[in-house]
Image (cartoon, rainbow, N blue to C red):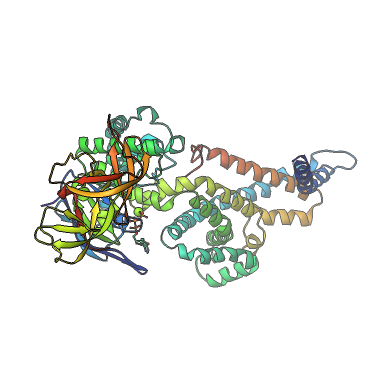
Amino acid sequence: MPFLEIVNLHKRYPGGVAVEQVNLAVERGEFISFLGPSGCGKTTTLRMIAGFETPTSGTLTIDGADMTRTPTSQRNIGMVFQSYALFPNMSVADNIGFGLRVAGRPASEIRERVAELLGIIHLADFAQRYPAQLSGGQQQRVALARALAIRPRVLLLDEPLSALDAKIRIVLRHEIRAIQRQLGITTIYVTHDQEEALALSDRVVVMNNGRVEQIGTPSAIYNTPQTAFVASFIGTLNVLPARVVNRDAGHLEVGGQVVRVGRALTDATGSQVTLALRPEIFSLNGAYGPDANRLSAVAEELSFLGPTVRVRTHVAGHALSFDLFNTTGLVLPQLGEQIELHFAPEACLVLPPG
Amino acid sequence: MRRASYWSWLWLILGSLYFALPLLATFQFSLLAKKGEIGLTAYASVFRDSGFASSFAFSFQTALATIVISALLIVPTTYWVHLRLPELRPLIEFLTLLPFVVPAVVLVFGLSRSYNRTPLTNSHGGLHLLLIAAYVVLSFPYMYRAVDTGLRAINVRALTEAAQSLGARWPTILFRVIFPNVFVALLSGAFVTFAIVMGEFTIAALLAQPAFGPYINLLSSSKVYEPSALAVVSFALTWASIGLLQWLSRGVGQNQPGGPR
Ligand SMILES: Nc1ncnc2c1ncn2[C@@H]1O[C@H](COP(=O)(O)OP(=O)(O)OP(=O)(O)O)[C@@H](O)[C@H]1O
Ligand SMILES: [Mg+2]
């Protein structure tokens, strides 16, 4: 039995549908991300879990109890907001202790718990400061501590880092993950930053247009996307129109060159499909062995990106870029040089025609 | 730049004169009670009259009651409008203008007709309550606007939701989160309300209440120099009272160096 379960969740507004038919089962202690473009319903789904919105239909169960219509204040849920939402009239310590004071815990217990959390978020010296005297990153740490102080059953975070600058964002996201592991708290994290979702999560829920597109581990989402949307939304993709020449053997044809995908296809022989190739799957030196696919192309542009070098080419009239690791002894193709791109059959993604 | 500041100084001085000259003239006149010498005779006579202290105290209490009731009424209402009924904001803003449009006489007449033959109109205490209720109506525009500004300065929805997720219910949210954060804004509305109530004449007189406004009026129809002295005294006292309120409320809501967010 999953710890948190969402069944057939719908949310309609007078203006339209925000969330449609969302199903999700979260295990105790899991770190789940909701990832998707703006307006896809991530926040709405999270707010229904928090109890700020009532679902139009569907159910939410936490730890075996139906919570669908329970008021937020009785759900025992920790919430971290993009805008921090610290109480401006209270010191850091009072902010963190707020939930415990509301619950009527004894003062000594509150003091201990606040001190413990201040230690966890590395702000022990800031207990008496007010939110306005803290940086954004510090404020968000306090907000996290405040949410955790009540030992919530579930921690919900809605784009907690998007108001911070890139460096702090990365530091803080690792901190959040470390604290989450340490406390073993079931967590749902909303973001539209795929790198954040992939780096942090046990599983990622990719959403689009109010629906769940795919739920899976970061590697499953990245390596075996199940819909064209997931494939194109996560990472960079080269898309080439292709035709199935042998369905059972898994052979495609791209601009007169044959590509083997190494598995039987679902589309009939002769039908049009899209062959999607990630930029990092290619090699120029035959590293994938004699069974690798080969596509010939002409190197047109090189851009040096630091750890990688991006090479732009055209295959059968369609742009294709790939990355080479900037390893010692890397031999770069010359501009205008005819090159042969090697890639493994398993690295091919076959999607419906775009 | 220099030119702009020259003009702004000029306007500042003109404004100050407009404000200060009548006050200075009143003050000077109040010193002339004894023929041929400058002295505080008028002031002595003002303070000797027992009606002065009692009416001032009466109005002071009435003002405080008005502020407390008004705050308890308007903060939750405005908060709710911000949180749940933002589309009602134009309507509320229109309603806040009514006390300016409806003359005080009409207001009193309406009140005393509506509550005729109820305990509100047939006892002294009842009439005092009615007076406070009328003042709450008068304070509405000032209090509402002050609280509205205060609420705009904080993220009402996020703060409410944060408190809810931490287990707080409505009374806790209102008194521990919302009130403290609009307190400074509320004070500004409270000061205006205080000043209005201290000087109000029409309603107090029509409800036959021993308030400060009618007392000043009574005095000015029977004496020459004392009303001027009283005007100066009441001016000073009102300002002193506001200063006192501010001093008493120091600390509350003041610990936000960057202002509330
Ligand atoms: N209160 C509301 N009334 C009407 N429509 C709403 C309301 N809240 C959200 N929506 C709509 O529901 C859809 C989903 O919104 P939601 O806020 O969940 O998106 P999101 O995935 O969190 O996007 P973002 O990344 O921009 O935060 C949007 O089309 C939005 O316009
Ligand atoms: Mg959102």
Q: Which residue is situated farthest in the right direction here? A: B36
Residue B143 as seen in the image, left or right of residue A166: right
Q: Residue at x 59, y 64 (%)?
A: B97
Q: Is residue A24 above or below residue B255?
A: below
- Front-lying residue, B139 or A316: A316
Q: Position of residue A171 (x, y in %)?
A: 33, 34
Residue A235 seen in the current view: no
Q: Quadrant of residue A167?
A: top left
Q: Which residue is situated farthest in the left direction here? A: A248
Residue B45 seen in the current view: yes
Q: Quadrant of ligand 1?
A: bottom left
Q: Is residue A21 above or below residue A139?
A: below
- Front-lying residue, B82 or A342: A342
Q: Residue at x 15, y 64 (%)?
A: A267
In the picture, the quarter occupied by the C terminus of chain A is bottom left
Q: Residue at x 40, y 53 (%)?
A: B157
Q: Quadrant of residue A86?
A: top left
- Front-lying residue, A314 or A128: A314
Q: Position of residue A51 (x, y in %)?
A: 28, 56
Q: Position of residue A124 (x, y in %)?
A: 35, 28
